[in-house]
Image (cartoon, grey):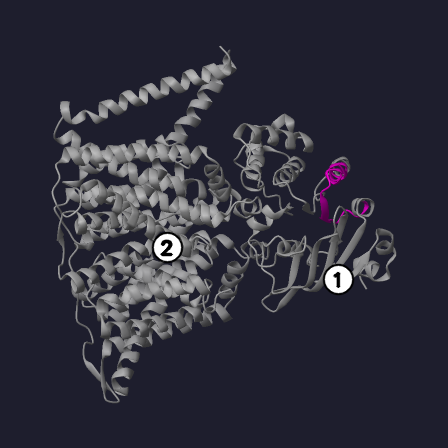
Amino acid sequence: MRILEGKGVTKYFGGLAAISNVDFHVKKGEAFGLIGPNGAGKTTLFNVISASLTTTSGTIRFKGENITGLKPYKICRMGVARTFQTVKIFPDLPVISNVILGLHFGMSAKISSAEKTQKAAEYLEFVGLSKMIMAPAKDLTLANQKRLEVARALATKPELLMLDELMAGLTHTEVGEAMELVTRIRERGITIIMIEHVMTAIMSVCERIMVLHHGEKIAEGKPKEIATSKEVIEVYLGE
Amino acid sequence: MIVTFLNVVIAGLLLGGIYALIAVGLSLQYGVARVFNISHGEFIMLGAFATWMLYTMAGINPLISLVISGPFIFLIGFFLHKTLFRSLLNASPSMNIFESKSMLATFGLLFIIQNIAILIWGADFKGYSYLNVGVNFGGAVFAANRLVTLVYAVIIGTAFYLFLAFTRMGKAIRAAAQDPKTAGLMGVNINQVLALCFGFGAIMAGFAGALLSMCYPIQTTMGLEYTVIAIIVVTLGGMGSIVGSFIGGFILGIIGSIVTTIEPSLYLVVFYFIFSLMLLVRPKGILGK
Amino acid sequence: MDIATLKTKQNLITGAILLILLILLATLPLYKPGYSVILLSSILMYVILTVSWVIFSGPTGYISLAPAAFFGVGIYASAIIGKAIPFPVVVLIGGVASFVLALLVGALTLRLRGIYFAVFTFGLVMLISNAMNYYEIHFTGTRGRFVMVIDYNTIYLYMLGIFVLLMIAATIIKRSKYGLALMSIGQEEEAAEHTGVNVVMVKVIIFAISAFFMGAAGSVMATKWTYIDPGIAFNPFYSFMPVLMAIFGGMGQLFGPVIGSAIFTYLEEFLITKFAELYMLIFGAILVVSILYLPDGLVGLIQKLWKRFSERKHANT
């Protein structure tokens, strides 16, 4: 089943096309990679899917429903969650409150206040943050803040999770831990789209990868195909 | 019929020139220095009263006294930025927070400046007569002082536009408006540039006030209304665009003139209606980025 | 005693203290009539304006400069319908009128960046003043209006009632999921929206609720001025004072604005007779100084000093 589908997705900033006529689809349950040099339009594509930005033209469908033009909070409640390239946690709120917000507003089931606190603690444990649930979020290390963002996203009970450069700025060990986290998320049945520059991670985790360059899709396929594709290599190493 | 309409339009242009100047001042301060100066109108008032004082007490020609009062007002703005806003900038973790804090600080400044003025000059209307002679312009008569106001406004605006476009300092200002960090890395003394811009914004207000004092009676509480008008002009024309400020200023001036001939007390309501319309349809303004 | 029982005990003690204070305040007209009642009414007015302002602008960082507009709407509601309708209904209508106005303003401007909201609300006072002026001159043929007279004890009790309702509302909002939503909006609005928060609706509704209390307060206080006109009712100073008191007092806790309001109202009463322009000047200067040197307000400063003091104590043991 195609959980996410985009046809002719285009976004202009003034006269510049950040993404141009991109067709893509993501299958339910898979890990889909999105790569490309800096400025290729990867985060713009995320922004357009999650409705941080409006599309200039094109349609996006989630589980068959047209979500183009909907507000971000609606898309979140429908089951799409994301993290951000520059970590956007709520710095002056305690770690657990960051997650509880997702339980309050991001999911449709009505549960009691005590249950929310308990569930929040569970999500924090899932990402490995049980030791610091009361700390102000700004006091966390970058790696932990990224974990917190994931926990908050998971709290909205998404079926699709979009990770924007989860591994950026992480040490080698931390990258390994992040990859392991992604695997555990997939075990829960959540479909994943990830933007990454850390090639080893993307190649080993994702089943399909799409390559963007100057806003256009230049390649799509299995990791092995992408790794050996002439166009992709040129784009990364320069002409 | 056409003559009356033309009269109204031209009268609107005359007022629009002043509107344009105050908008340019506000635009400079927020567009570059990122300080939304809601005490802007008080600087207009200071310019007006300085000119009035120099004329009534020392007989100095209002058009010349700009040379005296202008630098003073510029320095007030310059030092305000160097001290107050520089400290706020250093104490603010993000640009959003700085914008909030600095705007609130200017709210305090509003009450400080206005009340100092009331203490010095009282709260009554003051005025003087200068060039209050009629000039015949193809059948219609306009007051010479208002024509001079328009001419001066256009000259000042054009001069400043050229300054921004062609001088080294002007380019530094435009760079700072686009990207302060990079401009700083390129060797622009950002602290100096921001303070200068704030000073320039203040002097624009001062000029506008001086011109206003020539044509209308003035009051120490006059500032608020002009700040609100400046806000609306800048929203209409686009923040950061000098040409936009002039376009917006003239449009609002003409509309204001039309409304004033029909129903004078409603002009602010009409302005706010336009304001609301812009926010609904195109918040960044006609020429805004 | 375990933590749960300790907390309940603390809550009960706080509750008891507040109740006693409330009873003392409510019976004030009986044992200290006259000037104290009038002064306290003014203090309550500013407290209501300030706390209402803090409910919305505190956590979200969206600076509203409109309190004077909502307060003025309440004043005019009283003046226009006050003589024909029972007073409690008048107060309610004043609040509702402000609520509706805030809904409109919010729906228009809270979809945009905070600066648009701030400057739109800044000019709102002048706009409504102008509009009211036009209406009065052309439709009712009057310049100003005479407001009905109500004895100052009644005014005081109404203000006390509004204050209590406000504090209850403020506490409920703060502790609810909407309080959390407001804070998340103030810290990272985009992330909040992506976590399922309908940010525009939350902002607009809370803004309107805060306006309700300002309008209700206006309707009550209108009876203090026997004669009003748009210039008197719509005074930018009533936008300035809540901002000053909130920033000086501190916006983190609810009693910061209460303390700030009490101090400044007292100062105002003291200075207004002799030094009208001077005190406004001084207050302006205090605002600037507070923004510079009291980032968390007076309460925040005291909390910081207390923390440092108790840390030093522990360090020595």
In the image: residue C119, left or right of residue B31: left
Work out whether B46 lies above or below A156.
below
Q: Does C131 lie within the magenta span?
A: no
Q: From the top left corner, tell me how far across and down residue A173 is, in percent.
A: 77, 35
In the image: residue A71, left or right of residue A22: left
- The nearer-to-camera label among 2 and 1 is 2
User: Residue sitting at 75 percent across and 56 percent down?
Assistant: A36
* Of residues C26 and B122, the one drawn nearer to the viewer in this rendering: C26
Q: Does A191 lie within the magenta span?
A: yes
Query: Alpha-carbon distance for marks 2 and 1?
Result: 44 Å
Q: From the top left corner, tell me how far across and down residue C51 is, in percent.
A: 34, 37
Q: From the top left corner, tell me how far across and down residue A230 is, in percent.
A: 86, 61
* SS state under label 1: strand
* Of residues C212 and C245, the one drawn nearer to the viewer in this rendering: C212
Label 1: how many Cα within 10 Å (few below 14, some 14–19, many 20+): some
Which chain is home to disc 2?
Answer: C
* SS state under label 2: helix
* Of residues C97 and B188, the one drawn nearer to the viewer in this rendering: C97
User: Residue sitting at 38 percent across and 35 percent down?
Assistant: C170
Can you identify the residue that label 1 sits on? A217
Q: Quadrant of the C terminus of chain A?
A: bottom right
Q: Amino acid at mark 1?
A: Lys
User: Residue sitting at 40 percent across and 20 percent down?
Assistant: C11
In the image: residue C169, left or right of residue B126: right
Q: Amino acid at mark 2?
A: Leu
Work out whether C24 lies above or below A21.
above
User: Residue sitting at 77 percent across and 56 percent down?
Assistant: A210
Can you identify the residue that label 2 sits on? C104
Q: Is residue A138 visible?
A: no
Which chain is home to disc 1?
Answer: A
Work out whether B127 lies above or below C107.
below
Q: Which residues are magenta?
A: A178-200
